[in-house]
Image (cartoon, rainbow, N blue to C red):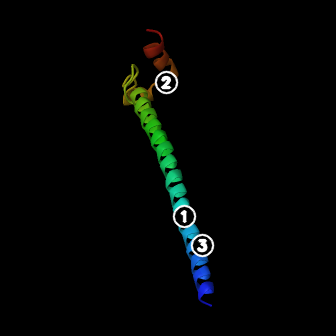
Amino acid sequence: MNIIKYILAAIGLIFVGMLLLWVLGFLSSLLWCAFWIGILGAIGYGGYRLFIKAEQKYIDGGSTAGSINARDFDMSWDEYDKKYLHK
């Protein structure tokens, strides 16, 4: 009867060891996936910031910035054509 207890204890230790290795592998794979998702997210966020910076450069200040004032909205097409298009 004593030998059966030792055999069962050894089998239990083997299964507990396998379970611990499975949990460790599962956690490391989750961390590895989170690492790569973080890298891709950082690259995407950096690209987005560069895009917004370039877009603001062209939208906010350009060669035509401020060329049409509020008073120009009241002009007819003919007045606008004479003033701006035939310089």
Give the Cα distance between marks 3 and 1: 10 Å
Q: What residue sits right under mark 2 in the picture?
A: 76
Disc 3 crowd rating (10 Å Cα; few below 14, some 14-19, many 20+) is few
Viewer-closest of 18 and 1: 1
Q: What residue sits right under mark 3 in the picture?
A: 15
Viewer-closest of 7 and 29: 7
Image-quadrant location for residue 63 = top left
Give the Cα distance between marks 1 and 2: 79 Å
Farthest residue toward the bottom?
A: 1
**Element assignment for label 3:** helix
What type is the residue that disc 2 sits on?
Ser
Q: What residue sits right under mark 1 in the picture?
A: 21
Disc 1 crowd rating (10 Å Cα; few below 14, some 14-19, many 20+) is few
What type is the residue that disc 1 sits on?
Leu
Image-quadrant location for residue 3 = bottom right
- Sequence order check, earlier mark of 3 and 2: 3
Viewer-closest of 45 and 39: 39
Residue at 63% in and 85% down: 4
The x and y percentages for residue 33 are 53, 52
Vertical relation: 68 (above or below) 41: above
Image-quadrant location for residue 70 = top left
